[in-house]
Image (tube, rainbow, N blue to C red):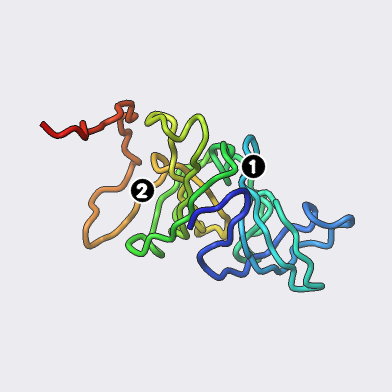
């Protein structure tokens, strides 16, 4: 699905939100329904929710302020939640049916964590997306520690025991710098 600034997530998810990021007086972790995301250049992805108590919608919650379970509500740094800021208002979101729920290992600033695939996003219509060495697809993962991480493809490996072998350590791949094109003229 193609979006500009805001978009709905492709799956139904309940989460809990650290109210220190949303309420005038912190009241601890609050149940919410995750309904969408926001992309603003130079900022972290924003998480848009509807709170269970009161029904208020709140937008642009930073990704390190949410958890998928109460016992996952330990400290989590924004650098563990996300490796790169958004670089466009325009983005595409996809829940790849082949990857749906697949086990992943994601490399964050503080370490490598196991989890599962949620969906993917990629920016478009900006100065970076058309450059092969700068364009990124972001993999959104719910980690086994209950936290969210949003990492580019070079920081995530997919684990499918029926196909993939030897996923550790995360392999170093070369950066794609070449633009491949086919001359459309016919001779």
Q: Residue 167: where, in percent of width, then height?
A: 30, 48
Q: Label 1: which residue?
A: 40
Between 76 and 87, the residue placed more toward the observer is 87
Q: Which mark is residue 157?
A: 2
Precedes in sequence: disc 1 or disc 2: 1
- In this rendering, the answer to whether 27 lies above or below 156 is below
Residue that appears at 60% across and 64% down: 68
Viewer-nearest of labels 1 and 2? Answer: 1
The quadrant holding residue 129 is top left
Q: Are marks 1 and 2 in contact (CB under 8 Å)?
A: no
Q: Residue 95: where, in percent of width, then height?
A: 43, 61
The quadrant holding residue 24 is bottom right
Residue that appears at 21% across and 58% down: 163
Characterize the local packing of mark 2: few (<14), some (14-19) or many (20 or more) Cα atoms within 10 angstroms. Answer: some
Residue that appears at 72% across and 55% down: 59
Name the secondary structure under disc 1. Answer: loop
Q: Residue 78: where, in percent of width, then height?
A: 63, 43
- In this rendering, the answer to whether 185 lies above or below 4 is above
**Outermost residue, left direction?**
187
The quadrant holding residue 77 is top right
Residue that appears at 64% across and 42% down: 40
Q: Residue 70: where, in percent of width, then height?
A: 65, 66
Name the secondary structure under disc 2. Answer: strand
């Amino acid at each position: 699905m193609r979006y500009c600034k805001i978009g709905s997530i492709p799956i139904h998810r309940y989460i809990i939100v650290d109210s220190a990021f949303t309420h005038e007086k912190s009241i601890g972790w609050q149940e919410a329904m995750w309904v969408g995301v926001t992309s603003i250049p130079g900022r972290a992805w924003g998480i848009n929710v509807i709170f269970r108590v009161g029904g208020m919608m709140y937008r642009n919650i930073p990704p390190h302020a949410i958890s998928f379970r109460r016992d996952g509500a330990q400290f989590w740094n924004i650098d563990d939640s996300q490796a790169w800021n958004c670089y466009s208002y325009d983005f595409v979101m996809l829940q790849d049916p082949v990857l749906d729920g697949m086990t992943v290992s994601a490399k964050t600033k503080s370490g490598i964590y196991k989890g599962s695939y949620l969906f993917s996003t990629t920016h478009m219509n900006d100065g970076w997306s058309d450059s092969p060495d700068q364009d990124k697809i972001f993999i959104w993962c719910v980690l086994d520690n209950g936290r969210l991480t949003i990492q580019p493809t070079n920081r995530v490996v997919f684990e499918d025991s029926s196909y993939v072998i030897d996923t550790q350590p995360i392999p170093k791949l070369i950066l794609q710098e070449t633009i491949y094109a086919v001359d459309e003229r016919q001779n």
